[in-house]
Amino acid sequence: MMDQAALIELINHYKADPESVYNTWFVGGAERMKAFRSIKRGVRDTVESIAAGTFPNDFKGSPLEVVMTAITEQKQVFEGAAHAFFWKPKMRIPDIYESEDNKRRFGSFLQACLTATREDQLLSEIQRLAGAQIKGLGPAVANILYFLHPTLMPPFNTAMLNGFNALFSDKKKLGSWDSYLQMRDQIIETNGQVSGYLSKDLGAFAGFLFEIGTGRIVVSGNADAILKLEAAKVEKAARIRHKEVQEELHEESEHTQMQYLLIKIGRALGYDVYVARNDRHRTCEGESFAMLTIPELPLLDCDPEVMDTVRLIDVIWLRPDSREIVSAFEVEKSTSIYSGILRLEDLSRSIPDCASHFYLVAPDRREKEVMAQLARPAFRNDLEAMRLSFIPFDDLQCHCEAMCKFGEDHTVMRKIARNRPSL
């Protein structure tokens, strides 16, 4: 490994690059923070499904698919993270779909990791899972563990492994839990040595390794490897990243536009408006969200973790006199519909005798996806009492001015809302 001064110089380069995953995902990606609770909920659903005997014999349609979809939506760093869990019938892997024993072992592992509070508990569970030797189930599971315990378990993929080997002049191999645990120890030790430059959340260091492994950051240990890739391939990778970042900026801009329209309508109807705490710095059409919205939500009767999640809901309308919440909106341009539903459900459960109206706002092309999520068996009982509807982007944009001018109260939104399937 290089000396500490050289390492810090590379880390500073990583943090200064506006297109690095540090800026586009770790600190700049609002969806990263939103994902933690929805992934934890999905893991809990997976455990319950295995315990109830309803977990299917395929990845598709399983609650595990929901978990991995929420993870892979975290953009470049987790692209392909779900592949390890796809059922491969010819090889009969990963063997958690056909083998009931292995399925239960996997469920027990996830349950234990959900409830673990100490590092030694997690390490014991990993050793127990590794000892079970479930065919095809390797350290790709660490991508789930990261979202359960981000300061104790780093994520894991080929690019991160390559980055680790280059940085530490090592030869760790993919697919070995022993290698993963050795990597983890080295990552935690090194992250401690550069304390103050990254974060206790190991996602920051994993993103650093990812950038080295993909060739965007060159260290002496991987310079030869980068040359073998040929300059053209490296340039192509840089162009792809640039295109991805531009697409994300476009999506972010459209998301901001929809939030602005909802803020505008809410204010025109006479409501106080709250916007997600991580979006208060945004502006649209020359107007600052911070100037148009209230700075804080009234405290709800819920635990702090749920309150933190509710504060990330995109737009909430409140009566100015009583601060009663009348409507809440989640804007989902390309991110997880499942996560948005969970945040709205958390809010609904936190309001006594809830009479509020909740809306998922998404592009027209996602209507089938929205309705499919709302019809999921896992949501049937939970959503039965919720007034939850879908609003397409185009309708919101088209009718915004009319609703501002002619609307009398929040019920005007029902004019453009599409109801969920009958449960």
Image: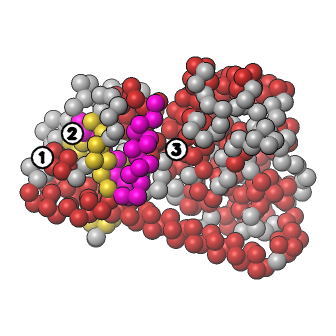
Q: Residue 404 lies in magenta, yes or no?
A: no
Task: Where is residue 297? Give x, y as percent.
Answer: 30, 40
Residue type (three-letter) at the residue carrying disc 2 = Val
Horizontally, is 330 left or right of 236 in the view?
left
Secondary structure type for disc 2:
strand
Secondary structure type for disc 1:
loop
Q: Residue 326 carries which label?
A: 2
Task: Where is residue 243? Give x, y as percent.
Answer: 57, 72
Residue type (three-letter) at the residue carrying disc 3 = Ala
Which residue has dot 3 on it?
Answer: 35
Instruction: Determine the CA span between mark 2 and mark 1.
Output: 10 Å
Horizontally, is 26 left or right of 325 in the view?
right
Q: With respect to residue 368, does 57 lie above or below?
A: above
Give me the residue at 81% from left, 57% from top: 162
Q: Can residue 276 be seen in this view?
A: no
Instruction: Determine the CA span between mark 1 and mark 3.
Output: 32 Å
Tag 1 or tag 2, which sits nearer the N-term? Answer: 2
Viewport quadrant of the N terminus:
bottom right
Which residue has dot 1 on it?
Answer: 409
Instruction: Determine the CA span between mark 3 and mark 2.
Output: 25 Å
Q: Give the range drawn in magenta.
A: 356-377
Q: Residues within 10 Å of mark 1 (few under 14, many from 20)?
A: some
Q: Do the residues labelled 2 and 1 touch (CB within 8 Å)?
A: yes
Residue type (three-letter) at the residue carrying disc 1 = Asp
Q: Which of 126 and 303 is in front in this view?
A: 126
Secondary structure type for disc 3:
helix
